[in-house]
Amino acid sequence: MAFDSFRNSERAGWSERAGLYDDATARATTQAIPAMLAAVRLFHGARVLDAGCGPGYAAGAAAALGARVKGVDFSDEMIAVAGKRFPQLPFEIADVEALDEADNSFDAVVSGMVLYHVTDPPKAICEAYRVLKPGGRYAFSQWSAPSVSPLFGGFLKIVMAHADVAKADPAPDAFLLSDVDHATGLMQQAGFSEIESVQVESVLRAPSDDFYSFFMRFGVRISLILSRQTEAVQATIRESVNSHFSQYAKGGEIHVGMPCIVYSGQKPV
């Protein structure tokens, strides 16, 4: 299945959120960047590709550590935001499933919370392998499964109890890569060796006044599902979400666990 409608909705959704990312999604996604950069064994002067760069946080962090960095993303609005945030770095519109880069070009490739959004994750992994130099390293982050994620576990339980998820466009399994064995297998099939996985115990810190509305700005997938529900269903889910996550209130915010996994591997020499 091509998932064309899902792909188009993802691009449109993230383009709409490009200006909001800093005070929404970045509150959680950036917490995996140190682990990704450590996993690729970053060194001064390394040539790094931030594949699916969004607003460019990983690219900016790698550059601050002395790497020569390029960022690519399929959203023109994200590229525009990244360029304004890090004007000294090159950013281009590109598809992580079909990179416009030469073979054996980079010492490292990183993808922060990207494969969760693409239609063909194995293809994106193979593209990362292709553009890496022999001995180069690849790392990507992925949200942990709802069974171990207080955020996703709580939110999706409510959604599944009240929403008609069949109204959403067909989409790949969002948590397929949360299965360490499956993700490791895909990396092995692409050719990677020395494959490792590390769990990052990230915590989402969000405004406590209306957590439901905040999370609709945070991501695209769930908001697409809920936008197709009746007003009554949306109201029920809003009330249930805000009630459920109030248990995580702390110091005027919601502090809820949202762990992720950082996978990494090396292209053999």
Image (spheres, rainbow, N blue to C red):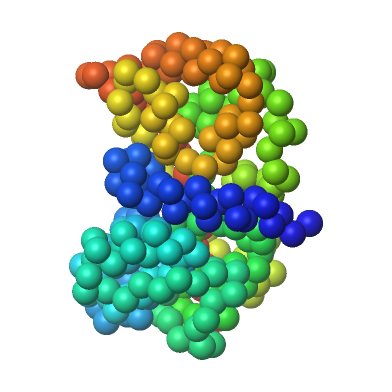
Residue 269 pos. (x, y %): 52, 86
- Using the image as rendered, state which of residue 124 and residue 136 is in the foreground: 124
Instruction: Specify whether 149 is left or right of 188.
Output: left
Residue 251 pos. (x, y %): 22, 19
Residue at the spot x=44%, y=24% of the render?
A: 212
Vertical position of residue 245 compared to residue 75: above or below:
above
Vertical position of residue 168 compared to residue 15: above or below:
above
Residue 48 pos. (x, y %): 37, 75
Residue at the spot x=68%, y=38% of the render?
A: 168
Figure quadrant of residue 119: bottom right
Vertical position of residue 128 compared to residue 120: above or below:
below
**Outermost residue, front direction?**
231
Instruction: Specify whether 231 is left or right of 34.
Output: right
Residue at the spot x=49%, y=27% of the render?
A: 150
Instruction: Specify whether 206 is left or right of 233.
Output: left
Asked whether residue 129 appears in the rendered view, the answer is: no
- Using the image as rendered, state which of residue 153 and residue 228 is in the foreground: 228
Asked whether residue 235 appears in the rendered view, the answer is: yes
Residue 34 pos. (x, y %): 32, 56
- Looking at the rendering, in which quadrant would you find the N terminus? bottom right
- Using the image as rendered, state which of residue 10 and residue 29 is in the foreground: 10
